[in-house]
Amino acid sequence: MKSPTFAIVDIETTGGFASASQITEIAIFIFDGKKIIDEYSTLINPEQPIPFHIQALTGITDEMVKDAPVFDDVAEDIYHLLNNRVFVAHNVHFDYSFVQASLKNSGYDWKASRLCTVRLSRKIFPGFTSYSLGKLCQSVGIEIQDRHRARGDAQATVTLFQKIFLSDTENIIQKTIQVKAKEQRIPTHIPSELINNLPTTAGVYLFKNSASKIIYVGKANNIKKRVISHFTGNNTGQRRQRFINEICDIDFEETGTELMAFLKECHLIKKIWPIYNRALKKYEPKYGLLDYEDQNGYIRLSICQVRKNVRPIYFFGSVHDSTQFLLKLIKDSELDLRLCSFFANPTALKEVRDFTAREDLPQVEEYNNKVTQAIESLTEQKRSFVIIDKGRENTEKSYVYFKDNKVHALGFIDNELEFDDIEDLITQDNLVVHNFYMNHLVESFARLYPNKVMHLKGLPLEVDSPVDDFIY
């Protein structure tokens, strides 16, 4: 097999994120495994002001780059130097993200295998207190000329890489050179052991920051694969880069099934509300059924939008569902349509307009008794059941306790354990913080897999009810 050649790169930029900043200088050295065979360096006009603190750090000023080429002018040369070569840099994710984004903006679709001299140094030269370029070079006896300039830092990285190359007795470089090698995807500040220790089973994973605070909770059918996927892709947005940079530790909890992973994730997010978890908010119910007494003493039923401090007696995910539900309640309980309010939607209210209005309102006390009985009937319709499924290992099984139309508890029990009352198994740790999404998810699962359901109270769920919302 032909030996690879390496493009050893360093850049200077106007900021820390490729989506909002630009390259001000680039240096590239082509190394064939024995010697440098080509080199290139240039200042680049970023077409935006260079922040003062970066001018102070690099010495590159707006005046210096005023007459320099813009990236478009040098993109072709850079592309041909990098194409079909292994991209090498110190903290490779930073340099690679900028170069790839800049080439893409210039019309070049470029990808490359990557090697990070930080990560390689940790493996081949273990035990140093710091692996920053300056301190690492000092530790291994490399002198850096023109620090914080692309050419000077790139030359130091070349010498460092040559030392790594010669010391690589275990063929580490070759093992990590493939485009899809997992090592190259993981940020250098995250120890590879954290990734290696992740299971390939279903469960939840927790990203923590340097203060051990949970900043993100995720679910997965394959925890390891899903965690690695967070560090792939070409999203150079500032929010994503900040998120990745904050991850310092990874914890996990196996759940046995995808359903348990879904529910555990929802529970933890509702309990902790990590800063980077936002998606579940869109699954909260948008509409609810309220009861109130009007100025004439009638108890009215009304569909409204769910807002803070509003406590509906029933929830709905759509206007159509709320309309159909209230229409059925009116019909079954013989309520007066004029004393009920639907959410304003012309399509959903077509059936409402088809009702024949009566001239006289009913007697207040008699009508209120009907409404009260209708509301009580909703309580009586509450169902409870337990979903029994596989556990985290062969000796146990998982359970989801759905009590009075709400997810109440999650847990695991021994395969040999027999119980008469599910309540006897539940501890404080098994209780969950439920929400509309979780409740709907469990009901959908129960309809889809009735053989896994043990009914305790209320009518069984209809098997042919819609289950489209239960999607992994």
Image (spheres, rainbow, N blue to C red):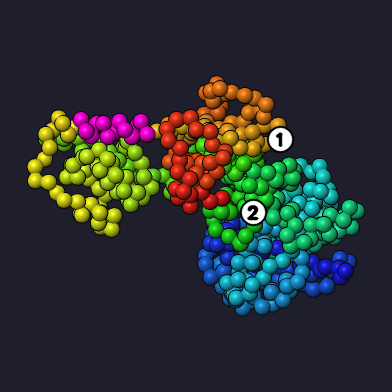
| Residue numbers of the magenta segment | 369-381
- Residue 378: say if magenta: yes
Contact check, label 2 and label 1, Cβ < 8 Å: no
Residue 260 or residue 396, whichever sits in front: 396
Q: Residue at x 51, y 49 (%)?
A: 470
- Residue 102 image-quadrant placement: bottom right
Whole-percent x and y of residue 322? Answer: 32, 47
The residue under the point 64% across, 25% down is 417
Whether residue 130 appears in this view of the structure is no
Reading the image, the residue beneath label 2 is 229
Instruction: State the residue position of label 1.
Output: 394
- Characterize the local packing of mark 1: few (<14), some (14-19) or many (20 or more) Cα atoms within 10 angstroms: few
Q: Secondary structure at mark 2?
A: helix
Image quadrant occupied by the N terminus: bottom right
Question: Height in image: 59 above or below 457?
Answer: below
Q: Residues within 10 Å of mark 2 (few under 14, many from 20)?
A: few
